[in-house]
Image (tube, grey):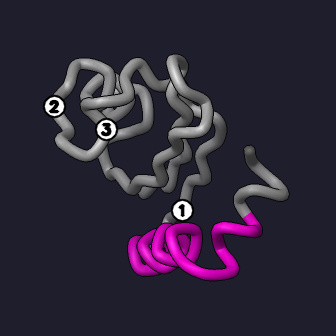
Amino acid sequence: MYYVYLLESLDDPSKRYVGFTEKGVPARLEEHNSGKSIHTNKHKPWKCVVYVAFEDKVKAETFETYLKHGSGHAFAKKHFW
């Protein structure tokens, strides 16, 4: 399975992150919270707000890209944050 996940900083809820993983969300969240990601290190700890599982890698990557750009921001804000 392939996962697209949305994180929110516990210290500053205005800081959010959208990511993709094949490892599984708990393992990836642990990496974010332990400081292994340069993109999320400054605003840890994080909590997972939502994740979506896909069987198809291309569809997962496409959804991640959508959430990170343009109308995908509005969609995530309306439905997930």
- Whether residue 72 is in magenta: the answer is yes
Q: Going 58% across and 68% down the picture, which residue do you hit? A: 67
The residue to which callout 1 is attached is: 54
User: Picture coordinates of residue 51 (x, y %)?
Assistant: 59, 45
Q: Which residues are magenta?
A: 57-75
- Asked if 42 appears above or below 16 in the picture, the reply is above
Label whose residue precedes the other's in the sequence (3 or 1)? 3
Amino acid found under the numbered disc labelled 3:
Thr
The residue to which callout 2 is attached is: 36
The residue to which callout 3 is attached is: 40
Label whose residue precedes the other's in the sequence (2 or 1)? 2
Residue 26 visible in rendering: yes
Q: CA distance from mark 2 to mark 3?
A: 8 Å
Q: Select label 2 or label 3 by which is in front.
A: 3
Q: Going 69% across and 80% down the picture, which residue do you hit? A: 71
Amino acid found under the numbered disc labelled 1:
Phe
Residue 1 visible in rendering: no
Please, what secondary structure does the residue beneath circle 1 have?
A: strand
User: Picture coordinates of residue 21 (x, y %)?
Assistant: 34, 51
